Each structure stands twice: as structure tokens, then as C-alpha cells.
Amino acid sequence: MVGGGVIGLAAAYRLAESGAAVRLVDASGTTGASWAAAGMLAPISEAVFGEEELTRLNVAAVAQFAAFAAALEDRTNLAVGLRTEGTLAVALNADDRSALDRLSEFRTALGLPSETLNGRQARALEPYLATEVQAGVFAADDLSVDNRSYLQALALANDLAGVESVRDDVTALVRDHGRVTGVRTATGGSLTAASVVLCTGALTQRLAGYPIQPVKGQILRLAVPARLRSSGSVLTRTVRGIVRGSEVYLVPRAGGEVVVGATQEQQGFDTQVTAGGVYELLRNAYELLPISSEFDFVEARAGLRPGSPDNGPLVGPAENGLILATGHYRNGILLSAMTAEAVVRLVAGQPLAEEWKPFGPDRFSPSGHH
Ligand code: GLY
């Protein structure tokens, strides 16, 4: 298993529990996109035109997530902070409103349940929303999870299940007679394995040539101060909107943290947080929820989403001895439980669930790495 982000951790845990001997190789631990993420499990409010198959996969994934998280909590005695209050998408002006209406029609046509609200009804759900909010769409079935608690629980579950953790970078795949037989590592060694599983996100192109590009997301962590919390919850559900063409979401956590994300930038492997990125996020959060300017500022961070040409993940066999579980773009946390089950099946040579059919690595050709 190469890569200790959410996909690698979830898959290693499930594989080890299925009885396999698993080694997980990652130099830096979980500091990449999974750690930066907001933890939205929101197939309904994130469904977009042209991505019907991905939406079907995401809907199947959210249905499996709660049971996976409950089993993980049982195994580790750690809470992962699953929230079930839903997602409220809001519109600030007439343009936003028609964009939201068009998306709602599309989602309804796919059979995804959501409820259209006027501004007053939206504020009844979230009283601190800006008075400018004209309309909303409420997706009650969308969930969220505290991604960092979830990752910590997965890491512990790996230890408990006997996964061997190797702190090293993988620099290349090792091939022998047309088969991938292991990996070479930065410290000069090599490791052999009956199956190599790449869960390498934005680094996959470097290792295996598949066309996955880093899509930078800058994201903030704010905290509702105790004096605001004493009179009840300031934010109960995930709230999202489009402000002057850029998307913003606010995701509340049980302890008073509010995650505000995220920018989308294509500029290679840069993870620098910028003044402009932070400004845009704070401004947009303020426009949806003015009281957010009174929140404590805790952290700003950037992560690299692994984006494939069609925004869908690459999960399946790639070569003899090589399996990919990567390219999860905006949906890594959401798809982690379902991907872990898929990896267990792939390693055992079993067929995958129907929803995975469009997402085999063979829809792309790798370049330059053979
Ligand atoms: N799924 C949220 C994001 O990628 O920003």
C-alpha cells in the first residue's frame, strides 16, 4: 500500500482485517489533502451537471459511510464526529438563485432528495444567515465527518489490525517480466509485494504516469468563541453558497470549530497559503454568515486534490501486480469507506460493485513511465 492519506489508511485497515499482510509506505504521514479537507459527505449538494455516474458512486458511498464509521469507532474507541444535520445551499441574489434552481432540477431528475426553501425558511434553519439570503435548498441526507478525528481513528485501526507502517517515500515501481513486483524507496531500499496498491493522490502521475493533476484548495479553520456559543448554536448544518462566482462552504464541528473552504486553483504542487486566498474565503464566509467575522482564526492551510480529466477516481487493476485507488479529487473522505472495500475485492481478484464500472484506470493511458 503506497500512500497514507485517507484512501491508503482506510484500505490498509480493511485489507489487514480481511487477513492480508499489509505494509503501508508513506514518509510524511497524513499531512496531505486528507488532513486539509473539510469532511463533507455531500453527494446531493455537490452533484453537478455531466457527472451523473460520479454522483451515483458518491450516493452509494454515503450510504456505506455511517456503518463503516460506526465499526471504526467500535474498533478504536475514538469518535469520528459524524454529523447528520444536512447541508443548506443558499443564494444571495437572483443569479445565484437561478443557478441553484437549475442544479436542484438536475438533482431532482437524478432522484436525489432536497427541499427548496425561501429566505425566511432558510433563516429558520440557520438564524445567523445574512438577511440577503433569498432562497435555499436543503439536502437533509448529506453528512459530514471530522476528517482529522476520522484519520486519527483510521491510523489507530491500522495499528490494531497489524498494518506495518514504513516511513519512507516511494520513488519508483519495480517491474520484473512485465509484472509490478514492488517499489523502490527514497532511502535506497526496495520492498516486494504480491500486490502494490497506489493510493498516492496527486503524486500518482509521477509514479505511474496516470493523468492526475493537483488542484489546490486553501481552507480555513475558525472557532466559535465561548461567549457566542453560550446562547445556543451559531451554525448547526453545513452551509454553502456561490459568492461572486466563487464557491464557499462552512462546515460546523461539535467542539465549535467551523471549517471554511475552499479555493480551487491549478498551479502544480504549490501548497502556499496566500493573502488573496484567505481574503476570498473570509469575505465569502462573511457574506453568507456575517457573525463569522467574530469567530477566532485558528488555521489556514492548503491541500492538493487529485483531479483526473473527468473528475472521477481511478479504482481498479492497472497492470499485473498493480492496483490503483487514487484520483478521488473532491470526494476522498466520502469515497474512502467504499474504496477500502473495493481494494479488498481487487486484491482478492473479485469483481467490483456496479457503481465502479465507469472508474477503472483503463479509461486513461499512462504516459512515460515504462
Ligand atoms: N469537497 C470539497 C472540496 O473539494 O473543496
Image: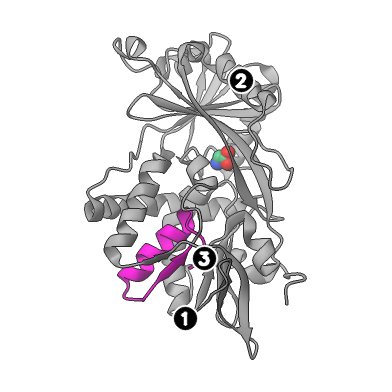
Task: Tell me whether the residue at label 2 lies in contact with that at label 3, contact meaning CB atoms closer than 8 angstroms.
Answer: no
Label 1 secondary element: loop
x then y, percent, for residue 63:
39, 51
Tell me the distance, in whole angstroms, between the alpha carbons under discs 1 and 3.
19 Å
Q: Is residue 49 visible?
A: no
Residue for badge 1:
349
Judged left or right of residue 19, residue 333 is right
Q: Quadrant of residue 365?
A: bottom right
Q: Nearer the viewer, residue 119 or 185?
A: 185
How packed is label 2: few (under 14 Cα within 10 Å), some, or many (20 or more)?
many
Residue sitting farthest toward the bottom: 177
Q: Nearer the viewer, mark 1 or mark 3?
A: 3
Q: Amino acid at mark 2?
A: Asn
Task: Tell me whether the residue at label 1 lies in contact with that at label 2, contact meaning CB atoms closer than 8 angstroms.
Answer: no
Q: Count the marks: how many?
A: 3
**Quadrant observed for ligand 1 in the rendered image:** top right
Q: Is residue 216 above or below residue 90?
A: below
| Sequence-earlier tag: 2 or 3 | 3
x then y, percent, for residue 48:
63, 42
What residue sits 57% from the left and 60% below the top?
A: 200
Q: Nearer the viewer, residue 98 or 244?
A: 244
Residue 191 on the magenta span: no
